[in-house]
Amino acid sequence: MDTNNLLALKQRFGIIGNSPLLNRALEVALRVATTDLTVLVTGESGVGKEFFPQIIHAHSARKHNKYVAVNCGAIPEGTIDSELFGHEKGAFTGAIEARKGYFEEADGGTIFLDEVGELPLSTQVRLLRVLQTGEYMRVGSAKVQKTNVRVVAATNSNLQRAIADGRFREDLYYRLNTVPISVPPLRERPEDIYLLFRRFATEVATQYKMPAISLDDEARALLESYYWRGNIRQLKNVAEQISAIEESRDITASILSKYLTDKEPTASPSVTQSARVEDMNSERELLYKILFDMRSDINDLKRMVADLHHGYSAYSTPVPSGGGDVKALLPHAPVEEFYAESEVVDEEPHEMTKADMQREQIVRALRRNGGSRRAAAAELFMSERTLYRKIKELNIEE
């Protein structure tokens, strides 16, 4: 996309940043805007997902019609169907008159369903019908109505996990996810963090007619290395707090650290909540793989024993009690390999701990992939960063 067009887009919607990941998301939004395809915007809370449906609507053929934004997570389950699809008079207690729903109001325009993962299953069925046929019925009515609405949905939850847990319909997921847009978290946009902080600090200074705060080099380094679990929303909150509370306008790292209250100053050395979740998921996947590999080893052993038994039964000559030429009796069995791998060692049995199992699995993966961490991490279903941390924790020599 032309750089000038992208810059104009950012200026129009007040978007700050030059991250390649952010630019890519914006480019996808502009390209899909001219179609009527359903879009699913994903990303953590506080990353700015709400800008993308606005961009899509503003650059679509529907831009002169209504744009309706609905926070699905803020509407009680008992009234969500009425809010989305409308109701007839007397449909339920308190329905003193008929009412249009959001899909009827947005006819010809765009509807943004934020936190779509919070929809109850019964409402998901209704939404699926609208996406498939454009048809719906008001609550308390048997009359089928039609609507021509562009749907853009957003979520900060893992819909694949929700599907596995039975909380979200798989067919609805694929209908919504026709065009996916992933908005990167702030920690993956380190080049944008300081720009955003300056913007928020300047806005506060202008609003309250005070000098804007500034960061020294150490404070800026701390700002850019922080994990920002709350993303842009948390960054703005910190900028506003410091601007209002601190008397000095020159902010040092020690001052800044007082406002990073969740005790997770950086993404790498500390164990953040996201990292803990990643560790739990990685360990679970790793243990699953260990179990599968163990089952495979057991099956291989069974086949080896079956081959030996078959070869043993094929000959009527008994094995001499003093040993004898076993290879002559079982010419098709890998005798040398079998004995070499089955050497009996007289020592106390060692019960493997979870750490031992993880260490062995990681070592195997590294060996199979020629020492490549990236390939080993992919095989073990974990990120390279997690694999590196595990290598250090388990004292694995590469």
Image (cartoon, rainbow, N blue to C red):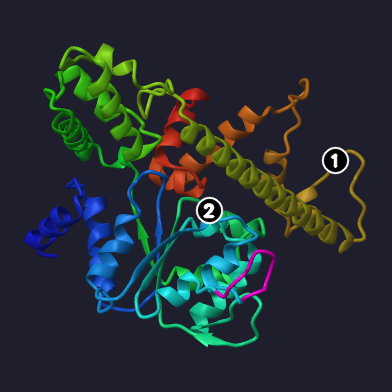
Q: Residue 215 in the image: state x and y as whole percent.
A: 16, 21
Is 292 located above or below residue 200 in the figure? below
Label 2 secondary element: helix
Q: Residue 221 in the image: state x and y as whole percent.
A: 22, 24
Reading the image, the residue beneath label 2 is 73
Q: Which residues are magenta?
A: 89-98
Secondary structure of the magenta portion, mostly? loop
Marks 1 and 2, the one that precedes in the sequence: 2
Q: Amino acid at mark 2?
A: Gly
Label 1 secondary element: loop
Q: Is residue 278 found left or right of 202 in the rendered image?
A: right
Extreme residue toward the front, this view: 96
Q: Nearer the viewer, residue 299 or 392?
A: 392
Q: Is residue 85 magenta?
A: no
Total tally of numbered discs in the picture: 2
Q: State the residue at coordinates (15%, 32%).
A: 202
Reading the image, the residue beneath label 1 is 323
Residue 28, visible in the rendered structure: no
The image quadrant of residue 249 is: top left
User: Can you say which quadrant of the picture contains the N terminus?
Assistant: bottom left
